[in-house]
Image: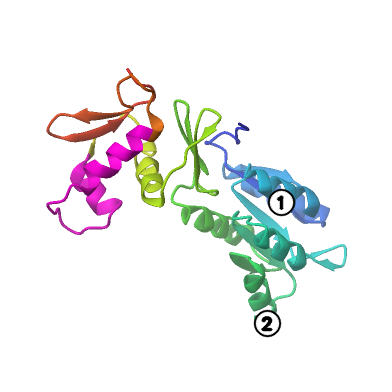
Amino acid sequence: MTKGPSASLPTILLVEDDEELANEIKAELEGDGFLVRRASIADAAHATEKSDAAMLILDRILDGVDSLHTLEIMRRQGAKIPVLIISASSSVDDIAEGLRAGADDYLAKPFYMAELVARVEAMLRRLGDISTTRLIVGDLEIDLLEQTAFRGSAKLNLLPREFKLLEYFARRPGQLVTRAMLLKDVWHYEFEVETNVVDTHISNLRRKIDDHGLPSRIANVRGLGYMLRAHAA
């Protein structure tokens, strides 16, 4: 399985044909703790298929050609990467076209670099964790963009609620997770209720992530809750 970039350095693909502006954007974002990779529109489309970047910054007009057509194709093919369009075309209709084509945000040129950085941070925050698009605990890996999970090279066939449950644990490896926390944050109950829904889903998840004959990776903490371990022990 192909691994993504370091979780501490979110990778941003930058497609911009103005060399001076591209260098300025790259320097600004890297100064704020991001890793910026310059790419052509074709390279960016290929990279998003592999989900090895946190987001894409895309100039709308590249060598005189509107890149929205390529963005529409990427979205139809299932690309889920957040996309920020930057463009000198900034009328209300232009912005509406960009958003309908699949952009998550649209920033008109010229812009202040501080605003660009703020837009990038806001978009990545909406993923739930600005630092990564992947969560890795031992040989468990979760791709937050593709909504897929793997144990080693084997893809786990998780139901949507099981995926959310595993994601919740993977964000807190080695930490106590109580039943009340799960009911509130995964099931969105505002108060604890008498139900075995947590136990049932954890049991189902254990069957999919555990090794036969070994202790569960989701350990019971007697009388308190559960804890995800990197390895069964």
Where does the image place residue 126, in percent across and percent down from the top left?
Answer: 47, 57
Residue placed farthest to the right in the image?
A: 63
Instruction: Indicate the amino acid at tag 1.
Output: Leu
Residue 40 is situated, as x and y percent measured from the top left of the image, at: 80, 51
The span from disc 2 to disc 1 (Cα, nearest Å) is 24 Å
* Residue in the picture at 65% in, 61% down: 75
**Quick one: quadrant of the N terminus?**
top right
**What amino acid is at disc 2?**
Asp
Q: Can I make out residue 24 in this image? A: no
Q: Which residue is drawn at the image coordinates 21% and 30% (left, top)? A: 220
Camera-side residue of 103 and 208: 208
Disc 1 on helix, strand or loop?
A: strand
The picture places residue 189, in percent across and down from the top left corner, at 22, 58
Magenta residue check for 199: yes
211 relative to 91, above or below: above
Q: In terms of depth relative to the viewer, which is nearer, 112 or 121?
A: 121
Question: Is residue 187 shown left or right of residue 51?
Answer: left
The quarter holding residue 53 reads top right
Residue 93 — which label?
2
Q: Residue at x 34, y 44 (%)?
A: 165
Residue hosting label 1: 14
Range of the magenta residues? 178-207
